[in-house]
Image (spheres, rainbow, N blue to C red):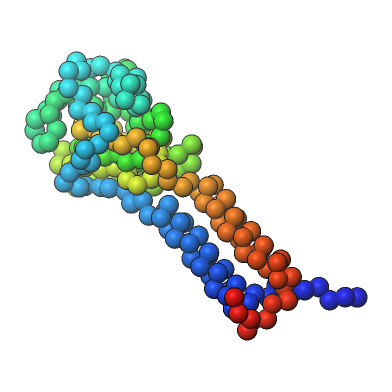
Amino acid sequence: MQNQPSLTFGKCQQITVKALLAVAAALCASAASAIPLSYASSGLANATYSIDFAGIAPDTILGATYAAQGISFTELRTTNDYGDLFPPSVAPAAVNFDPDLIRSRVFEFDFTPEVRDLTFFMLTSGTGGVVTSYLRGVPLESFDIITTGPVDNSGFFGFTDTLIDRVVFSIDGDGLAYLDNLAFNTATDTIPEPGSLALVVAGLVGFAASKWKRGRGLVSTESEC
């Protein structure tokens, strides 16, 4: 039986394959480099959209109030409570009360289309929890809400350098979450998704394989380019 050619790359082919794999690794690292922002002193500057709920009457169920900006809210309404006590927030703001004025343990932002960066001011009282970003139903990044005392846990939070279309807040117990000064950028720049990266890597591997096929696997490791 005739021996089949082995998968042996020449010196230059080895260099090419290593370079391609390095590019693939860099792409994967870039897509995974998004770091949640938590307890920061400021949010996004010069964002595509900024929302401070100015002009919205207290106790308004937010829902699709800002649909023109590509965002909708679930289980949130406006309030004047705590207004002006925690700069830079200025009343009114959003708070986690459902239509029956019961504090919501789960509430969310939804974006259509996706956004690339999001920050918001949040104050929490007597609660812990977690905030998670999603893209097409897949959880991406999250951060914990830390409780150190009543009505003193405030700062800017968010997610940057990654595509998201949903942010879900899961609050422990009967805690209060007060939100203001939302800012986000629309997804005008394409950032590779995991599925897209898989296609890129597959393409790179296919390119390397085509080089091998042209040499029929018989190229010596000492061959030149």
- From the viewer's perspective, is residue 194 above or below residue 10? above
Q: Quadrant of residue 171?
A: top left
Furthest-front residue in this view: 225
205 or 225, which is in the foreground? 225
Query: Which image quarter holds the C terminus?
Result: bottom right
Res 143 visible: no
State how many labels appear. Answer: 0
On the picture, is 214 further left or further right than 115? right
- Residue at 38%, 30% (x, y): give it: 111
Query: Which image quarter holds the N terminus?
Result: bottom right
- Residue at 14%, 33% (x, y): give it: 89
215 or 64, which is in the foreground? 215
Q: Quadrant of residue 15?
A: bottom right
- Residue 220 at what x, y percent from top left? 68, 81
Q: Quadrant of residue 125?
A: top left
- From the viewer's perspective, is residue 9 above or below residue 201? below
- Residue 33 at what x, y percent from top left? 37, 54
- Residue 124 at what x, y percent from top left? 22, 38
- Residue at 46%, 56% (x, y): give it: 28
64 or 74, which is in the foreground? 64
On the picture, is 213 further left or further right than 127? right
14 or 112, which is in the foreground? 14
- Residue at 21%, 47% (x, y): give it: 39
On the picture, is 209 further left or further right than 167? right
Furthest-bottom residue in this view: 222
On the picture, is 129 further left or further right than 153? right
Res 29 visible: yes
- Residue 210 at what x, y percent from top left? 67, 62
Furthest-left residue in this view: 85
